[in-house]
Image (cartoon, grey):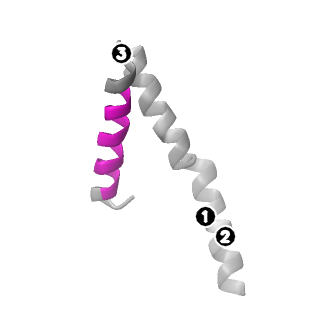
Amino acid sequence: MILLAVGGQLLGRYVRSRGTTANRQRDVYTLAIDGSAEHMEALCSVVDWLIAETRVGK
C-alpha cells in the first residue's frame, strides 16, 4: 500500500511537470498545423512523435 501511495505521488508529479501524452500529442499537432501542415500531415507528425517516444522509452 505504501508503495502505491508513493508511486501515485511520483506519477502525479511527473504528469504535472510534463503533462499527459494527450497534452503532448496536441502540442505536436498544433505545432505542425502552425507550421502550415494539413490535417493529415499533422496527424502523421503525431504518429511519428509517438513512435520516437516509444523507441526512447519515455
Disc 1 crowd rating (10 Å Cα; few below 14, some 14-19, many 20+) is few
- Majority SS type along the magenta span: helix
48 inside magenta stretch: yes
C-alpha span from label 3 to label 2: 37 Å
Q: Residues within 10 Å of mark 2 (few under 14, many from 20)?
A: few
Quarter of image, res 36: top left
Q: What residue is at 29 percent from the left and 57 percent from the top?
A: 56
Residue 46 belongs to magenta span: yes
Residue 8 got which mark? 2
Q: Which residue is mark 1?
A: 11
Nearest the eye: 7 or 52: 52
Q: Residue at x 55, y 40 (%)?
A: 23
Disc 1 marks a residue whose amino acid type is Leu
Question: What residue is shown with label 3?
Answer: 35
- Stretch of the chain drawn in magenta: 42-54
Tell me: residue 16, above or below residue 7: above
Instruction: State left or right for residue 23 relative to residue 52.
Output: right
Residue extending furthest toward the front: 40
Q: Secondary structure at mark 3?
A: loop
**Given the current orientation, which residue lies at the most extreme top position?**
36
Q: Residue at x 46, y 24 (%)?
A: 30
The disc, 1 or 3, on the residue closer to the chain's N-terminal end is 1
Q: CA distance from mark 1 to mark 2?
A: 5 Å
